[in-house]
Image: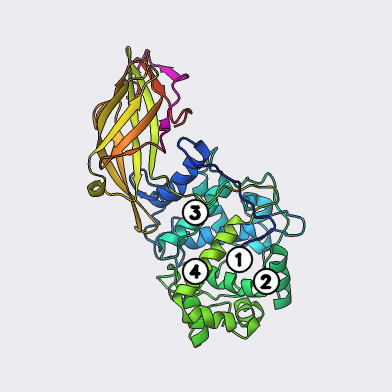
Amino acid sequence: MFFSLATSTLLAGYATASQAQRLWPSPQLDALDAARFDQSGFNGNFLMVFTGLDRCDNFLFGGGSTGRSNAADWIRTAYHDMATHNVTDGTGGLDASIRFTTEKSRPENAGDGFNNTFQVLSSVANRYVGFADSLAVAAVLAIENCGGPEIAFRGGRIDAGEPNAPGVPQPQEDLETHIAAFARQGFTPTEMIGLVACGHTFGGVQHTFFPDIVDELNDPEDTEDVAHFDSTSVNFDNNVAKEYISGSTQNPLVVGFNDTTNSDKRIFGSDGNVTMNSLASSPSLYASTCADLFARMLDTVPHGVQLTDVITPLPVKPANVEFTMANDTMLLGGQVRFWNHTEETAGTVQMLWDDQLGAIGNTTLGFAGAGSATGGKYTSAWYGFDPTGLSFATPSLDPAAGIQRLRFILNGKLEDQGGVGSAVQDAYMFSLSCRVCIIPVCRRREMSLLVGGLISR
């Protein structure tokens, strides 16, 4: 079961890597930016597009009437992975160690949500955004797109090579044991209350894995017998606190038939309900508190791991930049994202490129599509340049002159990263010869691909 999340600003195991002014290209930061902010629409994140997270009641592994949701699984997995942290020796933390069979088969990790989560993450993790970073991103997307606050996200987690020691609190344990477990993770008793209250805005407890907590429900709209923590279990709100304080809660860890496992009741009431009263009385306080707690949870990492600064979206960010060789001509393709713009506000977009001989070329880009993030709070306008010439303008380059950098003009304003432009490396190219073309993509005799100076795709 999900037990809670994490809080505070200074923490053993939490570290950030200092960054100079971020410029494109920076492969790891660009990949983290894309995972974090290219959520829906054009170039949308696989986590959003494939799992249907725009519908927060969606559950990829069983349909819409199971009582379960992807969002709840992802947040629970992130907490259980983090809960192995030990502030004394710096071990454990959010490092994707829960993907190992030894760790996820422990009694403290009952349920199939961990397997479900990593089945999805195996399709998105890559050399720049590993399993641990992907898990953190999944939790952020779930919270933000299901009514929650914005979460400060850092990258740079390192995937564990082996299981961590046990450490997840269990519902049958007494209050003193829970306080000690959270203290080992670096949290005070007051923080413990907040962590549980924030985590339990989503999801519930499933009969199959916790028959001593939840009976069979025989509900056709809840076919996996999930007793939810509050009445709005697929949306972020403070109902878990409001319903607890009002006495109307159906939380199975507060009013369950087995008082031994009513751990939320013991935790919530451990300070005389002072914290829960404050969270119940103010949705804005609940949201701001949870924003801090979730960020802290995700940033709890093993000692020595250096996280990046908080990832913010570049105002202008090229993507999928590639060269294609056609006979003696070099064709340039790709897209560029203009953050917090729409097609209407971006207007006419021009791209300039400086070649190695000092000449400047330019073309007008075509609108490729719109993107959005954080439940539609932010928008992005994507413009394209197409090496095939089928969709957008096709910039043609002299191979002898090459290209040094890209610049863009948006609404008459030059966007060039403070004068340095967006550097493109043209010294080395990967060439794929297609003398016998079998697949449709190999229409030309030779194709070459370059993405931000690095081969990718």
* First reached walking from the N terminus: tag 2 or tag 4: 2
Residue under numbered circle 2: 188
Drawn side of residue 10 relative to residue 57, left or right: right
From the image, which quarter does the N terminus lie in?
bottom right
Q: Position of residue 380 (x, y in %)?
A: 33, 48
Q: Amino acid at mark 3?
A: Ala
Residue under numbered circle 3: 138
Return the mark for residue 288. Answer: 4
Element under disc 3: helix
From the image, which quarter does the C terminus lie in?
top left
Element under disc 2: loop
Viewer-proximal residue among 87 and 246: 87
* First reached walking from the N terminus: tag 3 or tag 2: 3
Magenta segment: 418-438
Q: Is residue 276 magenta?
A: no
39 over 291 or under it: above or below:
above
Task: Give the CA distance from mark 2 to mark 1.
Answer: 9 Å
Residue under numbered circle 1: 7
Task: Give the CA distance from mark 3 to mark 1.
Answer: 19 Å
Viewer-proximal residue among 419 and 16: 419
Asked if the residue under mark 3 is in contact with the one under mark 4, i.e. CB atoms within 8 Å, the reply is no
Q: Residues within 10 Å of mark 2 (few under 14, many from 20)?
A: some
Q: Amino acid at mark 1?
A: Thr
Hey, which quadrant is residue 114 in on the image? bottom right
